Amino acid sequence: MSFLTLISLFLVFSVSLASECNKRTYTADSFVCVCDANSCDTLDIEKTFEHGKIFIYDSDQKTSRLEKTIVTVDQAKAKIYNDNQFVLNVDVNDKKQNILGFGGCFTDGAAINIDTLSDDLVGQFMADYFGPNGLEYNIGRVPIGGSDSSVRAYSLDDTEFDFELKHFALAEEDTKYRIPLLKLAKELNPQFRAFGSAWSSPAWMKVNHQLNGAGGLIWGPGDVYYKLWAKYYVKYLNAYLEQGIKFWGLTTENEPAEGFRSGYAWNALGMKPEEIRDFVKLDLGPALKAAGWGKENLTLMINDDNTNDIESYSSVLLDDAEAASYVTGIAYHWYSRNYPSSYQILSKVHDKYPNYFLFSSEAGNFGIASQFLGAWDRAESYAIDILEGLQHWSTGWTDWALAVNTDGGPNWAKNWVDATIVINATSQEYYKNPMYYALAHFTKFLPIGSTRVGNSVLNAPANVHTTSFITPNNNLVLILLNTNNDHVDMTINGFASKSITTTLKPRSIRNMVIAL
């Protein structure tokens, strides 16, 4: 299949899809939903909610995926499985941060996997992520050049000592695969926006002359190689713009701290906080502004690394007024996270720099994908990270590769990973992991502009997580996660016209929605 014809194919694409999950169980503790040319479940979630009624959506380890129940306020009663006096108090007048969006990464490997599907399945797959009956992703991360999720290591200018970047060019991975998919995502969801992240500069710009391994740019900020690196970013943004893709955002680079690790297996570029600070104010910021990519046209995010680095990278850069003037947000990854300390760090950064949004730019589980098909604990890990991030001022969340094959690739560095959707090209089917439905509890209910509102808990049992939002349509949304093996009863104040009670099933996610 040629992705260059994908857009026109989509415009006439029409297939009758089953709304029920076609369950299949492998060795994990839950099931996947199988999609093929004959059937695929859809996420048919209401956009408007009748006043006076509570809409409840449940997913759990054993049986359900966004199973809907509608009750009146008077009918909202707990089943009383225990004597715990767990109380959630919601304060709709305590307004906090707004949602920017949710999405995933258009890695080379993901695009290559999608290309192994038939034309109809490609349209169905993309609708499952970006369409109105899918997750409605509105964010896409795009690697600038190569990453580990590819069949090769490369940059967009591998010609040695090309100081004028005359040989800079988008790769086949961009023009054949990625750009048509980005256009289709925008067609499916007009609110879709993309941001770019670079894993490494060309090897000839680095002190170790390798795309991977430990090494930063030659010389220092303000010098020729740093200016070339800034020019490389501008050429990339302009090249995509010429192809009809205008980027919403850019990160200063992917995981700068990893570029100091000796023997690092895949593309990396080491930069200390002071180097990024000076790169932004001496090279990147001025180059972007001069090329028409200033703050009014492009959202620049710093860090794009783990939460254990976020304080050092943020403080060094944002305490410098000139460097900070080019920055809008702070991106972070989930790999070093520990509950609750990592999320408390987010709140500390927000409290110190409240004018710069926080945004989760990468998350994902490791391992050979076929060994984890249907793993509910991986859905829980996603839900905890998203929910606790939101509770600590994050504005959104980005998954890693949109798709992997059953091995967890392709990946030239053999960094095998799991994914929300796993593609089996041989059987022409794909598997929606429990992570897909955990994500739906956020992506389908918290559109862009939704506002977190305050809540507090009393006598909360361990392993229960809560958050609360008001949507632009003035619906109040509670997202309740129970990772215990037992039922949990709770009383909720401030959600409806009077106190209500509800029971969370074991190992479950529950959304409760009411029109205000």
Image (cartoon, rainbow, N blue to C red):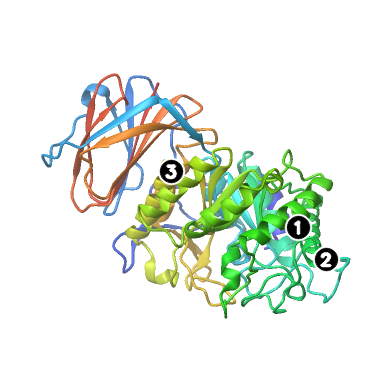
**Position of 75 relative to 315 (above/below):** above
Which residue corresponds to mark 2?
224
Hey, which quadrant is residue 367 in on the image? bottom left
Q: Which mark is residue 233?
A: 1
512 and 184: which is toward the camera: 512
Q: Is residue 91 above or below residue 503?
A: above
Mark 1 element type:
helix
Left or right, 435 with respect to 285, comes to: left
- Residue 110 x %, y %: 58, 63
Q: Earlier in the sequence, mark 1 or mark 3?
A: 1
Identify the residue at image location x=89%, y=66%.
164
Q: CA distance from mark 2 to mark 1?
A: 14 Å
Nearest to the observer: residue 128 or residue 182: 182
Q: What amino acid type should be assigned to the residue bearing mark 2?
A: Val
Identify which amino acid the numbered label 1 is placed on.
Tyr
**Which residue is more in the foreground, 269 or 111?**
269
Q: Which mark is residue 376?
A: none
Name the residue tied to disc 3.
392
State yes or no: discs 3 and 2 in contact (Cβ < 8 Å): no
Measuring 79% from the left and 46% from the top, which residue is drawn there? 289
